[in-house]
Image (tube, grey):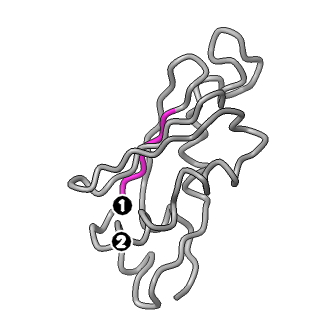
Amino acid sequence: MRKVKLHDIAHARAGDKGNTSNVSVWVYDPGDYPLVKAQLTADRVKQAFPNLVKGPVRRYEMDQLHGLNFVMEDALEGGVNTSLGLDSHGKSWSFLLLELDVEVPENRGPAAAT
């Protein structure tokens, strides 16, 4: 096994509602989905960003679509109307999650994903 950045094998989309950020992660190759599903847990996301996510993180699995949806509460410094942060909509969350490392077999990864 070797580590790759999640962005090498997946892409993401982000949204927000109030102080809650919502990020969906989609693997390029369905063969990578079980690896990502096993490693990218709600606990891991919460632990990776303890100063950014103040509330709970919930993960919803979309197995038939090979995607995971993360709902992170109290993650936008109050939301669009109250935050002084540069990214009050939470669009940066996609990039933050995609920078996490995942372990893949030696024969998988960026070359196999493209």
Judging depth in this view, the residue of 108 and 45 nearest the camera is 45
Position in image of residue 28 (x %, y %): 33, 63
Q: Residue at x 27, y 56 (%)?
A: 63
Whether 72 is drawn above or below 46: the answer is: above
Relative to residue 74, is residue 106 drawn left or right?
left
Above or below 61: residue 20: above
Give the numbered dot on residue 112: none
In the displayed structure, 113 sits above or below 106; it is: above
Residue 38 placed where, x, y %? 45, 67
In front: 18, or 61?
A: 61
Residue located at (36% from left, 71% from top): 32
> What residue range appears in magenta?
22-26
What secondary structure is found at the residue carrying circle 1?
strand
Q: Secondary structure at mark 2?
A: helix
* Overall secondary structure of the magenta section: strand
- Mark 1 or mark 2: whose residue is earlier in sequence: 1
Three-letter code, disc 2: Asp
> Could you say which is closer to the camera, residue 114 or residue 97?
97
Spatial CA distance of label 1 from label 2 is: 7 Å
Residue 88: quarter of image: top right
* Residue designated by label 1: 27
Determine whether, in the image, residue 75 is placed left or right of residue 108.
right
Name which residue type carries label 1.
Val
Query: Can you give x and y, in whole percent of width and height, for residue 107 in the image?
Result: 40, 90
Q: Position of residue 34 (x, y in %)?
A: 36, 69
Q: Residue at x 56, y 16 (%)?
A: 18
Is the C-beta separation of discs 1 and 2 under 8 Å? yes
From the viewer's perspective, tell me whether residue 68 is left or right of residue 86. left
Q: Is residue 23 magenta?
A: yes
Q: Is residue 47 highlighted in magenta?
A: no
Write down the residue under mark 2. 32
